[in-house]
Amino acid sequence: MDALEEALLHSGSDAYVAVGSSQDADMRYLTRFTTTDSILYIRRPGERGTVIVSQMECERAERESTAAVMSRAQAGLLEILKEENDRWRALARLIAGLVKGKVLVPPQFPYALARELSSIRTLEVERTALRDMRAIKSPWEIGKIQQVQVATDEAMDRGITMIRKARVKKGLLSQGAVPLTSGMIRAAMHKVLLKHGCMGTDTIVACGEETTIPHLRGEGQLRADEPIVIDIFPRDEQTGYYSDMSRTVCRGEPSPDIAEMYRAVRDAQDLAARLMRPGVSGAVVYQAVVDFFGERGYESGASGFVHNLGHGVGLEVHEAPSLGPMGEVLHPGNVVTNEPGLYHHGAGGVRLENTGVIGPGGFISLTRYPNDLVL
């Protein structure tokens, strides 16, 4: 019995109902079906769930989805539309015709539909079941994330190799006679990802003072002797799964402050990897890193260590469990990042990030690419 089945039984609901496209990670998880159109998902206790799709999508859904498939006509929508012009009211009537009792819905259930449906059926919002189910990955899911990580390692190597081979003239990096920019590195990395069927979006290639803002995308010509943070989180276009990875490098001689920050971040990452294991909460691991940085003289808050230690990775790049102040207990099958960082205006920023799986004995990194600051 999974968490959604337990939620249905505990709430006394007749069915769980969700509406959305496969851009909704919960819907993609429940159906394994990819579509840009909104579809309806209904699951009753003891059943595997049913997707209701347009007639033109039925055959494809039967091939791809793990759910049973029903056309909108079979569900009665076409007959309802002969009497009802309002889209949300018609959909509410369709659901009410299929679900006779209480309806359990996700937090992202459309408000307009909820208003219409609540007038004819009792609704209850389910907040945690899908989050908890998605947090523990199956071996199949872990394999798909690992495939993305292989592509991520190769893309990272492409970007860092370009920086390593760059010419230095008056403190600026160039590729031959052409200035080497954040955009060039990003484009080259994305080209590698596309070769593997993955897509990179908003990849960070930040240099110098830009690195003090953790999620600043980065623009312009790269400079020697300054930190360059590369953070890449691609998605496999076929499966929808992500991975996530960061490295900090310097072409030339980093400042003493950056060199010391790098050593502290690297040691903090090693500490976190040792502490992450089943039964330990993400909050405990996060606090251990906060304390470690404090012992090294680095604060947490407005500067220093300014973000969580990590997060779950799956059909979303940020999902449960969290490794932060409110971090949940870790379980075997969690896929999480380990990404300590330090940021100080005037010096720069350093972040190192590996993605790994929580196994019976602890954290197993799926990221194979080495950590080297100086190129």
Image (cartoon, helix red, strand yellow):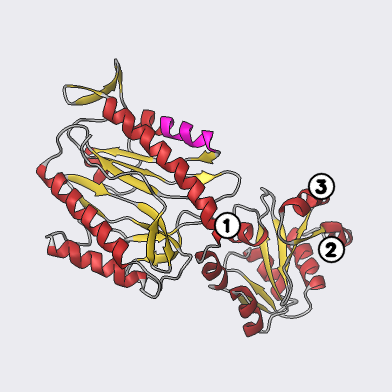
Residue named by callout 2:
75
User: Which region is colored magenta?
Assistant: 187-196
What residue lies at 13% left-to-right and 49% top-to-bottom?
Answer: 260
How far across and how far down the image is residue 1, in percent? 63, 77
How far across and how far down the image is residue 313, in percent? 46, 57
Disc ID at residue 140: 1
Residue named by callout 3:
56
Task: Decide whether residue 294 is among the magenta residues.
Answer: no
What residue lies at 54% left-to-right and 45% top-to-bottom?
Answer: 236
What residue lies at 61% left-to-right and 45% top-to-bottom?
Answer: 238
Q: Are marks 3 and 2 in contact (CB under 8 Å)?
A: no
Q: Magenta span: helix, strand or loop, mainly?
A: helix
Q: Is residue 307 above or below residue 98?
A: above
Nearer-N-terminus badge (3/2): 3
Distance between the alpha carbons at the discs numbered 3 and 1:
29 Å
Distance between the alpha carbons at the discs numbered 3 and 2:
15 Å
The mark lying in front, picked from 3 and 1, is: 1
Q: Is residue 92 left or right of residue 2?
A: right
Q: Depth check: give the residue in front, 18 or 231.
A: 231
Q: Secondary structure at mark 3?
A: helix
Q: Is residue 164 above or below residue 203?
A: above
Q: Amino acid at mark 1?
A: Trp
Q: Can residue 202 be seen from the camera position used here?
A: no
Q: Amino acid at mark 2?
A: Ala
Q: Quadrant of the C terminus?
A: top left
Task: Decide whether residue 190 is among the magenta residues.
Answer: yes
